[in-house]
Image (tube, rainbow, N blue to C red):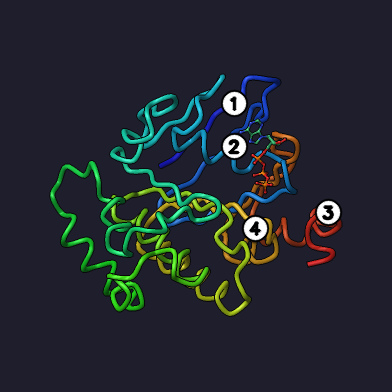
Amino acid sequence: MLEIDALSSGYGGPPVLAGVTLRIAAGEIVAVVGTNGAGKTTLLNTVAGLLRPVAGRILLDGAPIGGLPAERIVRAGLSLVPEGRQVIAPLSVEENLLVGAYGRRDRKGAETLEAIYARFPRLKERRRQPAGLMSGGEQQMLAIGRALMAGPRVLLLDEPSMGLAPLVVAEIFALVAELKSRNLAILLVEQNARKALALASRGYVLEAGRVVLEGPAAELAASPAVVAAYLGAS
Ligand code: ATP
């Protein structure tokens, strides 16, 4: 579904991402873990079209999407839930959701809105409320709902657990598991390596812009190097 080959990108200086190769299939959750500054956000932003690749290929169902404008990548079936959620605080919950359907050509926006409300009753209850007044967990639900409004086949999630209480994190992770069962391909970036690897089927460890380890999530979670670097204190 999503194939990333030897991808490099950055911010004009030395590449931050240096030759990353990664794959995700439909119905699969793949975790990318790594410390602060490893390049996880840079990877997602490049795949989503917010940053231009310097080298390498990105294929969505075999079609190249690397370097396309972000809105065309969304239309091709790939949506990003950005780090920090980035809901538009003064707009209502419903307006934020409708932003996610912008550019859809199949005119199924209304139907999707009903589907999102069915899945997230709290968003429906609060649909007229400014998004900025919602709790962190609700804003994360809204950010995921907004991404789903585009009807994606591939979903990129950037640190969805960040700053949330453990119960809320459990709720978000349960939602991600449910999306997987609906056959989405999900790339989950997390500093919470233990939780991410427990949810994912496979994982990649990113260090200084390179993949240093990859494999079945359970194997990574048990590997002494990963435990020492990422799981020891969590
Ligand atoms: P974090 O969990 O802190 O977000 P990360 O693994 O997602 O970490 P990135 O945000 O991708 O890491 O950052 C990787 C490197 O790119 C860091 O060295 C960072 O300083 C640099 N970087 C990030 N954003 C920019 C930017 N807008 N301009 C220049 N350098 C940047």
CB at mark 1 closer than 8 A to ligand 1?
Answer: no
Helix, strand or loop at disc 4? helix
Helix, strand or loop at disc 3? helix
Give the residue number, with chain letter if any, for mark 2.
Answer: 42
Q: Tag 3 or tag 1, which sits nearer the N-term?
A: 1
Give the residue number, with chain letter if any, for mark 1.
Answer: 9
* Callout 3 amino acid: Ala
**Rounded to the nearest whole Å, what is the CA distance between mark 1 and mark 3?**
25 Å
Q: Tag 4 or tag 2, which sits nearer the N-term?
A: 2
Give the residue number, with chain letter if any, for mark 3.
Answer: 229
* Callout 2 amino acid: Thr
* Callout 4 amino acid: Ala
**Rounded to the nearest whole Å, what is the CA distance between mark 2 and mark 4?**
22 Å
Percent coordinates x, y for residue 104 in the rendering: 21, 44
Percent coordinates x, y for residue 58 in the rendering: 46, 30
Q: Tag 2 or tag 3, which sits nearer the N-term?
A: 2
Which mark, residue 136?
none
Q: Quadrant of the C terminus?
A: bottom right
Give the residue number, with chain letter if any, for mark 4.
Answer: 217
Look at discs 1 and 4 and give the one toward the viewer.
1
Q: Tag 3 or tag 4, which sits nearer the N-term?
A: 4
Q: Tag 1 or tag 2, which sits nearer the N-term?
A: 1
Check the image and report above or below for 110 versus 82: below
CB at mark 2 closer than 8 A to ligand 1?
Answer: yes
Check the image and report above or below for 51 versus 198: above
Q: Quadrant of the N terminus?
A: top left
**Rounded to the nearest whole Å, what is the CA distance between mark 1 and mark 4?**
26 Å
